[in-house]
Amino acid sequence: MRSLIRQAWTTTAGTDGPHRHGFGQAAAPVGGPPMAASATRGLGYLSGMDDSVIAQLGVIATGQGSRQERARLAADMVRQATGARWVGIYTVTGAVVTCDGWSGPGAPAYPSFAVTEGLTAHAIRTSALALSNDVSRDPRYLANQEDSGSELIVPILADGRVAGMLDVESNRTGAFSGSSILDYERLADAVRPLWDQPPRQ
């Protein structure tokens, strides 16, 4: 499966601009104004997502292996393709949210937690993005990486409910703005098959 990463990862300098894919609700931002594009390079800002990245994430999501194995590969690819500092993919089951896979400098501080905690609670309750561009000022933030400055959570729906989450963190405040958020929505949509169909054998 690691070969999928090597095959898929190419570049983010595509010409196809970001597109909203149907979450249809606004994020819940906290913090200062968005950073200028020149200041967000390497912090998760994407200058138009290359369609090959989206396609290869779909290959990973529908590939062989457990959901945890595929989620780890997908998180690693999202991080490489975007320059994000930390990426996690979570599953929502009943009253618990569990990290299936992550990529970054350290493991998640809470591999499992209640659906009522963190920015995740807002994303689950509203089926909408949850955004904090200054986590030090946001009482909803559930500490993950000790030096995080911003967090974006994109809910992933399957069968009409929030089944998973794409969690992206930066060590800078004001890291996420309109264009980057739309691209992270595309990336989240690409990994939706982790929950809505079984892996190929």
Image: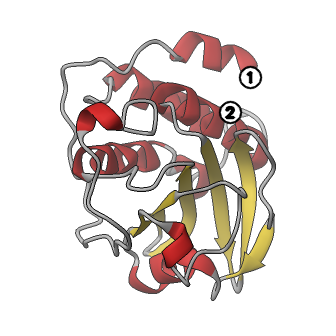
User: Which residue sits at x=38%, y=73%?
Assistant: 30
> Looking at numbered disc 1 in the image, what kind of residue is underneath it?
Met
Viewer-closest of 151 and 126 = 151
The residue indicated by pointer 1 is 1
Quadrant of res 55? top left
* Residue at which label 2 appears: 73
The reply to whether dot 2 and dot 1 touch (C-beta < 8 Å) is yes
- Asked if residue 120 is positioned above or below residue 38 in the image, the reply reads below
Q: What is the crowding at mark 2: few (fewer than 14 residues within 10 Å), some, or many (at least 20)?
A: many
In this rendering, position of residue 12 left or right of residue 19? right
- Distance from the alpha carbon under mark 2 to that under mark 1: 8 Å
Left or right: 46 in relation to 20 = right
Where residue 134 is drawn, which disc sits there? none
Question: On the picture, is 198 further left or further right than 176?
Answer: right
**Picture quarter containing residue 17?**
top left
Front-most of residues 40 and 115: 40
The residue shown at (73%, 47%) is 101
